[in-house]
Amino acid sequence: DAGITQSPRHKVTETGTPVTLRCHQTENHRYMYWYRQDPGHGLRLIHYSYGVKDTDKGEVSDGYSVSRSKTEDFLLTLESATSSQTSVYFCAISESRASGDYNEQFFGPGTRLTVL
Amino acid sequence: SQKIEQNSEALNIQEGKTATLTCNYTNYSPAYLQWYRQDPGRGPVFLLLIRENEKEKRKERLKVTFDTTLKQSLFHITASQPADSATYLCALPVYGGSQGNLIFGKGTKLSVKP
């Protein structure tokens, strides 16, 4: 398995509280991604990072922010959690090839977040 | 807008048979397509990548085809085993996107019965 860990693995929180999920990699890959996975929607990209302090929005970024201060860590923050953010969150990493053909993505084990 | 569809939510087959999963896409021509496997409670795991100029790619009992005219990829598992039971996801690079961003299909849940 690629060296990707996510913490916490499970979290239950209340509406309106801030939540931060952490993704940590030991592969020194440049690109990092946060997805959420919901029944009927599949995997959807929230935010991604293409380097330290370089981040951009994905398909479903509203209500989420990210930060990447080190190559190995990518944090996802829900500033004020809502019930619609109850989901399973996956972090992924990848590295580009010199030809511009992007490599596969390696996924972490996921964080199951429940917002009551 | 870009769309990717995996036609079947679920596929049930008998052990030893060939499983065939379908991935269709619209509105653009991707340079490549990827397939992933996801087991319950775990993250997806990369299986195969096929480029637009490749008709077919094989890896052990897996075979992927890529028909850019039909805008379709087929994923085959030959001599299927109960251990092949999982959800299989296809993924394409985001049109006009960068940084290797992918759009994923919703997946097909394969169940192989002994």
Image: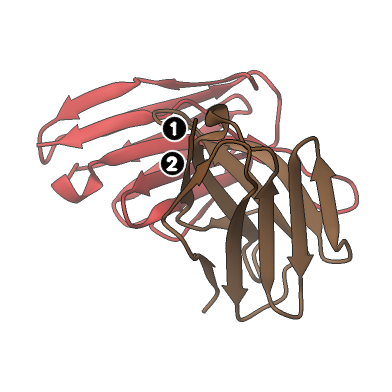
Chain colours: A red, B brown
Residue with the mark numbered 1: A75
- Answer with mark 1 or mark 2, whichever residue precedes in sequence: 2
Q: Nearer the viewer, residue B47 or A80?
A: B47
- In the picture provided, is B83 more to the left or to the right than B56? left
Distance CA(mark 1)–CA(mark 2): 5 Å
Residue in the image at 32% along x and 48% along y = A38
Q: Quadrant of the C terminus of chain A?
A: top left
- In the picture provided, is A97 more to the left or to the right than B37? right
Coordinates of residue B71 in the picture (x, y in percent): 68, 75
Q: Amino acid at mark 2?
A: Val
Q: Chain of mark 2?
A: A
State yes or no: discs 1 and 2 in contact (Cβ < 8 Å). yes
Coordinates of residue A5 in the picture (x, y in percent): 50, 20
In which quarter of the view is residue B81 placed?
top right
Residue in the image at 45% along x and 28% along y = B42
* Residue B99 visible at all: no
Residue in the image at 57% along x and 39% along y = B37
**In this view, A67 is above or below B99:** above
Residue with the mark numbered 2: A66
- The kind of secondary structure element at disc 1 is strand
Q: Amino acid at mark 1?
A: Leu
* Residue B13 visible at all: yes
Coordinates of residue B39 in the picture (x, y in percent): 47, 32
Q: Chain of mark 1?
A: A
Coordinates of residue A29 in the picture (x, y in percent): 70, 31
| Dot 2 alpha-carbon crowd within 10 angstroms: few under 14, some 14 to 19, many 20 or more | many
**In this view, B104 is above or below B97:** above
- In the picture provided, is B54 more to the left or to the right than A85? right
